[in-house]
Amino acid sequence: MILPLLLLLQAAPVAQDSIPRVTLREALQRSVQLNPDYVQSLGFVNEAEWARTAARLVFVLPSVSVGLDITKYSQPFFNLGTGGLQSTSVVFQATARYELSVRKFTDLSRTSAELEAASASEMQQRFAAAMLTEAAYYDVLAQGELTRVARERMDRASEQLGVARARVETGAAVQTDSLEARLEFTRARVGVRLRETALSVARLELGRRIGIAGPADAVPLDTLPAPDLPITLPDAITQALEQGPEYRVARANERAAKAFLKGQQGAYLPVIALTGSHSRFDTKVFPSAANFSSLDLGIRLPIWDDGQRELAVKQARTAHEVSQAVRGDLERAAARDVTFAYEGYETARFTTDLAAEAVAVAQENYRVQDVRYRAGASTIIDLLSAQNGLSDAEAVLVQARYANLLALAGLESILGQRLFPERLGEGL
């Protein structure tokens, strides 16, 4: 199984100079506009804005319609405009209608709530898209560092292979030492190849996220220790409930459902309508032979429509009750969700510190075992075990560092706010 993997090592490496590099800020700015869910959420915001505008306009503007009807008869027919028999009739009509009903007021409340829900959903999708981009960005950096760790392991294995061979040739060690070191070197070479492949895939994923038809590289971030959160856990829970996108969406949906229910219940009340009409009749396209105007004030009181009104009210009430349950459930779960994300970040910080200490211990252990093996006081198994322990500890540190960054992104997504805006750039 090792031979096919070794053959892959002969492949020519990809030219690194041809791969574009982006900062995290650039990646976020470019990717958010390409995310399908975010683009859809922007469309919903535009639709909700127009719906609210239309709900406001109905209070000041009537509905207006115009029509022109041209009829050709097979035989002369009485024409209302000319007062005689004509085979052609042209009728023009303009109608303006203004209604006053409860639904106008409830529609205004409903569309305002729907706009707020759409705006909060847009923010939610923006953070979700940003989190996907951050994950891809951190993956490139992590795979790059893991590739470095794998290469350092291969270099150490190569050095130990030379030492083992020298000791075997001098009779200070048995042939098994050379074979064990050679096997470790082969494993290290395979590990490098696997990491290089993972790095190539990660770069392609980052390129996809930022709209490049190919790989993209990430500019390294600073490796400073993760800072303390600028907010306490109780404040984080309060902030999430007040401005967290998911909770805002739930509250706005509940208000919209409540307004819709009131609108359906308003169908039991009368509707007052003022209608103005102007009609013209003639045999020409622009009729002017006769014209009539009318102004009608009507009051309509619905009595029975085969139960459709009652069914609509029940459906609206069910939707309102469901939205109430969703909002209540989210708010009750807020403490759990925020605590999980908050403590996840803190735990990731401690894990990173622990991993850094583990690397220091593994480095010292490897140094001691290397000296002992060269002096003949230790076996090749002990040396290789220390060498692998060092590589594993370095890999764990890399993974812990970027897991910490992802945990921060998850908490920010719940809160709907960047806790360290200087890390990404203002407005992201």
Image (cartoon, grey):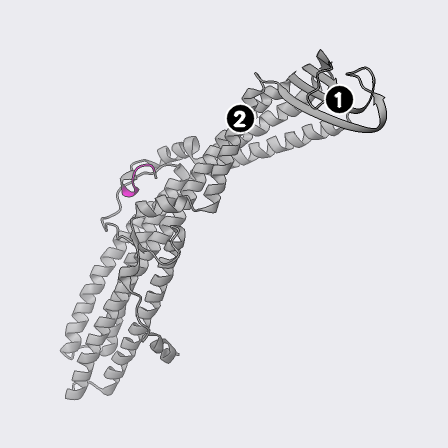
What amino acid is at disc 2? Arg
Residue 387 placement: quadrant: bottom left
What amino acid is at disc 1? Thr
- Is residue 246 in view from this perspective? no
Residue 146 placement: quadrant: bottom left
Q: Is residue 245 left or right of residue 379?
A: right
Crowding around mark 1 (Cα neighbors within 10 Å: few <14, some 14 to 19, many 20+) is: many
Q: Is residue 425 magenta?
A: yes
Give how far across and how far down residue 246 sits, in percent.
47, 37
Residue 232: mark: none
Q: Which residue has dot 2 on it?
A: 52
Image height of 381 relative to 137, above or below: below
Which of labels 2 and 1 is toward the front?
Answer: 1
- Is residue 367 in view from this perspective? yes
* Quadrant position of the C terminus in the picture: top left
Q: Does label 2 or label 1 sit earlier along the sequence?
A: 2
Q: Which residues are magenta?
A: 423-427
Label 1 secondary element: loop
Q: Is residue 329 left or right of residue 32?
A: right
Q: Is residue 64 magenta?
A: no
Q: Nearer the viewer, residue 404 or 207?
A: 207
Q: Which residue has dot 1 on it?
A: 283
Crowding around mark 2 (Cα neighbors within 10 Å: few <14, some 14 to 19, many 20+) is: some
Q: Nearer the viewer, residue 399 or 266?
A: 266
| Magenta segment main secondary structure | loop
* Quadrant position of the N terminus in the picture: bottom left
Q: Residue at x 40, y 44 (%)?
A: 32
Q: Residue at x 83, y 17 (%)?
A: 84
Q: CA distance from mark 2 to mark 1?
A: 43 Å
- How many numbered badges does the structure rendering display? 2
